[in-house]
Image: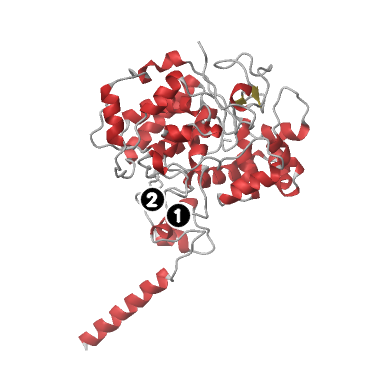
Amino acid sequence: MTQYHSHLALSPPKSQPMASLSGGAATTSRLLPSASRVRLSVCSASFSLYLASSSSYSPSSLKCLRFPPLSPLIFKDQKRSSMSTVAAASDAAQLKSAREDIKELLKSKFCHPILVRLGWHDAGTYNKNIEEWPKRGGANGSLRFEIELKHAANAGLVDALKLIQPIKDKYAGVTYADLFQMASATAIEEAAGPKIPMKYGRVDVSVPDECPEEGRLPDAGPPKPGDHLREVFYRMGLDDKEIVALSGAHTLGRSRPERSGWGKPETKYTKNGPGAPGGQSWTAEWLKFDNSYFKDIKERKDEDLLVLPTDAALFEDPSFKVYAEKYAEDKEAFFKDYAEAHAKLSNLGAKFDPPEGIMLDGVAGEKFVAAKYSSGKRELSETMKQKIRAEYQAVGGSPDKPLQSNYFLNIIIVIAVLALLTSLLGN
């Protein structure tokens, strides 16, 4: 039986046909619920932006996701889910439980790369030049709809949805948008990568009409790789350092020529799996997250390791090369910059409910003690920085969109006026 493999985000060359979504894959994608919370639900129960990856699992292990093709209940649910429904914030307790289930999934299926790709491709459609949600794209769960799954860059991601859907069915209080980003970040962490400073509470889009148009994700082999990367990632609000750092996630996964048109059918590193054999990886240990991707591209000593035009550009473009050289020498610097870039990517275009998001791992519950942060030259903790940033965003501010007026000055003025009135009335 055919083994499922996927790669993290490469658009196939124009001459290559898009991977077919026929058979069980297409059926499953059509049957996925279209809203994260349909109040009368019938069910109870993987870059890249241009990142290629592979997962290791068999359709036989996913029998729980097979549905009768003409099931009246499924079509009834699909009709109901096409109505606009309001998705509230994800439930914190369910988010934590879902994360543990994702960890178990990763241990049993070795599907780290495809889950990274899933989160990246949902968020990577963001356009900073469009203000309106969800037209601006980004992390909004739209990738669960068949119309977006059919985009060439998303070939094979229906398999990632089939893996993650049982967890979504189990935790109705978690939105698709949150689940996709949680799966991506958890996959990095469980592959020995850095801890990603994530927040949750993303709202899902409700209908396929809210999906972004095709063409917002990167290609693997454009005529001018450096220019292409900047065109795509600058549109998202990312800079050269973040482009190079995120490219480092290619340390995970394999590219399969039948999916993307890139890579060898098999190498000495992939012929025995884990999981289904085959494909070509960027690194020898393609399920371990480290900085070997940069080292291998720089040296180019092993013909069994993949180097795409967009990979080579990191050491050919003068601005990219500064960071690529740094990451090849300093894994800790790479981990730090990658974690920040991944977190930023996961928030692109998202609408949060509540506006400040939901922090797990006790971050949101830290009690503010003024003396702890205002004495001497002591720097604010990362936790407090996140709290201040969340409060700023909650009142409409952001790094890219300053407040239209001085919010804090307005508060001081109001307090002063009230104090004056109180004094006058007292006299």
In the rendered image, residue 131, in percent from the top left (x then y), is placed at 46, 56
Image point (65%, 25%), residue name:
281
Q: In percent of the image, x 51 and y 37: which residue is there?
A: 121
The x, y position of residue 114, in whole percent, is 52, 28
* Residue 59 appears anywhere in the view: yes
Residue type highlighted by circle 2: Glu
Compared across the picture, whether 169 is left or right of 399 comes to left
Nearer the observer, 122 or 369: 122
Q: Give the Cα separation between the discs numbered 1 and 2.
A: 8 Å
Question: Which residue type carries mark 1?
Answer: Met
For disc 1, the marked residue is 384
- Which residue does the numbered mark 2 point to in the structure image? 366
Residue at 65% across, 48% down: 230
Residue, x 31% and y 31% (percent of image)? Answer: 78
Which residue is most to the bottom?
427
How packed is label 2: few (under 14 Cα within 10 Å), some, or many (20 or more)?
A: few
Category of crowding for the residue at label 1, using alpha-carbon neighbours closer than 10 angstroms: few (below 14), some (14–19), many (at least 20): some
Q: Quadrant of residue 211?
A: top left
Extreme residue toward the left, this view: 426
Disc 1 is placed on an element classified as helix
Q: Is residue 45 visible?
A: no
**Residues tagged 1 and 2 counted as in contact (Cβ below 8 A):** yes
In the shown orientation, is residue 239 left or right of residue 33?
right
Residue 206 x, y percent position in the rendering: 35, 41
